[in-house]
Amino acid sequence: METAMKLLNIFSSHEGAGKIKDEKDRGYRQKYMEHVQHRFRLMKDLNARLGENVLLDHRYTKLIIVEDCLHKDLREQDVMAWGSAKIGKGQKRSISMVDFFKADEDGQTPQIVLLVGPAAIGKTMTAKKIMLDWASEKLYQKKFEYSFYISCWTLNLGSEQASIVDLILKNCPSERPPIEYMLTHPEKLLFLIDGVDELRFLLDQPESNLCSDPWQKKPIAATLSSLFRKKVLRESYLIITTRPTGLEKLWQCLGRARYAEILGFAEPQRKEYFHKYFNDAEEANQAFHLVKDEKMLFTICFVPLVCWIVCTVMKQQMEREEDIAQTAKTMTGTYMLYLFCLLKAHRRHSSPAVHATLKGLCSLATDQICRQNILFGAEEMKKHGLETSDSLFLSENIFQKGANCECLYSFVHLSFQEFLAALFYVLEKEEIATKEFEIKKKHVKKMLADYGKTRNYLMLTVRFLFGLLNEERMKDLEKKLSYRFSPKIKSDLLEWIRTKPRTLSLFLESYGVLASGPYRALLPLTQTLEKTYQFEEFHCLYEIQEESFVRSALSQVTYINVTHRILTKIDQVVLSFCLRHAPKLESLGLKSCEFRFGDLYDFPRQQKQAPLDPRLSPIYLLCQALKDPSCNLKTLKLWSCRLTGACCGDLASVLISNMHLTELDLRGNLGLGNHGVQKLCDGLRHPRCMLQRLRLRYCSLTALSCLELAQVLSTSQALQELDLGRNKLGLNGMKLLCKGLMHASCRLKTLVLRECSLRADSCHEMALALGRPCALVELDLQDNQLGMAGVEELCQGLRQPGCQLQTLWLSPHTVTEEMCPDLRTIKEAKPGLVIKSRE
């Protein structure tokens, strides 16, 4: 009894100690959440004065985020168009931050969310909003007890070695945190790793470098790799943000991850942002409508940083009633406006001093870009003739370093650093030495040589460089900054891009992921990243906005093929611009691409609704370019691009306007349907339509489509080849088509009806058509249930003297002469007829 009482007392004391410890942990968690709120509650505008802050909750505006990008599912749909296996179910859909860690249809919950988006799209703002909402008990409260924000650009400056515990402690206030509790409950931890693309090292560490001990100090690359690969704290959760090209650093580290892409602001959110920025409703409405009337300027406002720049400039421009639309047509033009805006704010300084500061900042930006540095100290600034008081374009960052604090500087945004680096190469004083110019020229050539290689830090700089070399912009810079530019650099750019004609005609893929459902296993990205750079070259040409330059650059391009890419409205504007200025372009192929036009789609609801206004057709911009008198395109392929019936109205107008177009391939677009074909036929029947080959394989057509197509066959003097394979046409569809074939005006030579739900009774109609004078010389009836009776019916038409057929495709099980003796008789009577089958 006495022993039992001792054990009970011991147990009670342990239980009491445990309760006290739990209370301490809860108390610390509350203090930690208050610390996070204080850290992320306020934000600074890029041009903010000392002490000026904005509430993050007030300024933050919802971004469109989608998961499940173009890859396996659309590849499967594409394969279906060629006659292969089963189509996948996955479709792109919108996703909110609250859903990042929700289970998928199979009940599996992702531990890693990869949040991807281009420069300035709002990745860091979203990451900070997640931290603030968690600390404010609005997000993930039941799921995570602790959330840690890790900025990758600060890791570049940290100590060479660190443990996971070190990374946690950097987030915690000075009071001793319950590390032991955290490490024993990893499933309650969220790590938010922001800006992986900004790391100066790769994460493809060998297995031997990884660690499973959260206390073990390792090089940062090994520590992060261990966290990403789930070697340490394997039950913890991660949100990782990166630019698309930053995936290069990740593909070997991540096995399965939910892939989410930030698309930017939809139109309602752009309007909301204007109102949040201006505060005054009347001013906000006036600014918003002024910008909205300028379509190109309004379009690029889908990028949050650009939206902020436009709002900032509008405050000044509205007062002076100046027109910013033409200047801000491109990203370069918009950034130039902001540059001039900042320079005007520094008029209190002498003009030479401001110019010297600008030149120093450009030199500093270039130097740090080449070194792949984002943060730098006062000593680095002094090397370029700058003082810490030269705050133009710069932000201060205070970091703990041992017992002391360290002040480091960065440009207000990485994209501004890239802009100023490009500006460095074009700004010259009149008295510039020849030697200095030659050094710049050498740097440009090296930058272009390195462009598109494994390191991706030069992409935006090169784009800005093209934009700055526009003659009108150069005159503007010369007038406002008293600088001139060298045309020799411009000729270097032209020579560089003209030596890459094959590049522009290769497959131009965006970054790639592959898996089913919302999870993604990252592919080796060497090839796909290279293809991202190649599409980037089109953006470079658009930035310069000089027709003669672009025509010269594209003078040898005859074929462009873009595959597995989401084409935003900006991408389409860029592509359309290049189509108009490629004089020898004959063929354009877009395979498994998705067109986004107008407002960003509210997935998935709006995708199912055909727009009422034909101008809202997703391919409207493309079709406008194809109708341009300068366009000589002969072949257009839009394979598995999720086109809808509404798209066919625009395509019909292209068929009427562009008399060079002779081939149109729309295979694999399940949304076309009968409604789409009806619209398309309006163009096909027009006397100006010169289309010779039309492919509508696997487009969800039924017999109703055949009524319109039969009318086309009876009127068109150009159409010679029609592919309707993998559509459920049936007997009624065959009857209608045959009426068109038998018309005296029909010029069709090739008809593909492979896998069209045809049976023996369908062959009677075809036999009648074949037996009459008919232009048809090739017929494909494979993968239909024709049977012996059906083939015998066909033979009745084949043996007629008026039959001109030279090639007949039948399924292997019906083509043997033993099974159908009539075939032997036909072959003997008509030696020119070839009967084939594909295995």
Image (cartoon, grey):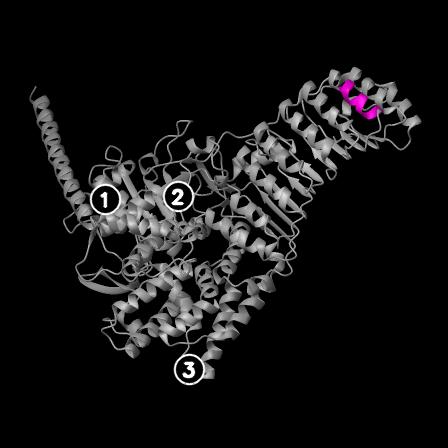
Residue labelled with disc 1:
132
Q: Give me the C-alpha separation between circle 3 and circle 1.
A: 51 Å
For marks 3 and 1 on the same chain, the one whose residue lies earlier in the sequence: 1
Q: Position of residue 72 (x, y in %)?
A: 53, 37
Residue labelled with disc 2:
114
The answer to whether the residue labelled 2 contacts the one labelled 1, judged by CB atoms less than 8 Å apart, is: no
Which residues are the magenta region?
Answer: 763-771
Q: Give me the C-alpha separation between circle 2 and circle 3.
A: 49 Å
Question: Is residue 452 visible to the viewer in this orientation of the structure?
Answer: no
Q: Is residue 329 left or right of residue 412?
A: right
Is 723 within the magenta? no
Residue type at numbered disc 1: Leu
Residue ID at (72%, 21%): 735
User: Would you identify the image quadrant in which residue 827 lies?
Assistant: top right
Mark linked to residue 59: none
Dot 2 falls on a residue whose secondary structure is strand
Of discs 2 and 1, which sits in the foreground? 1
Dot 3 falls on a residue whose secondary structure is loop
Up-down: is 465 above or below 236? below
Residue type at numbered disc 3: Glu
Q: Residues within 10 Å of mark 3 (few under 14, many from 20)?
A: few
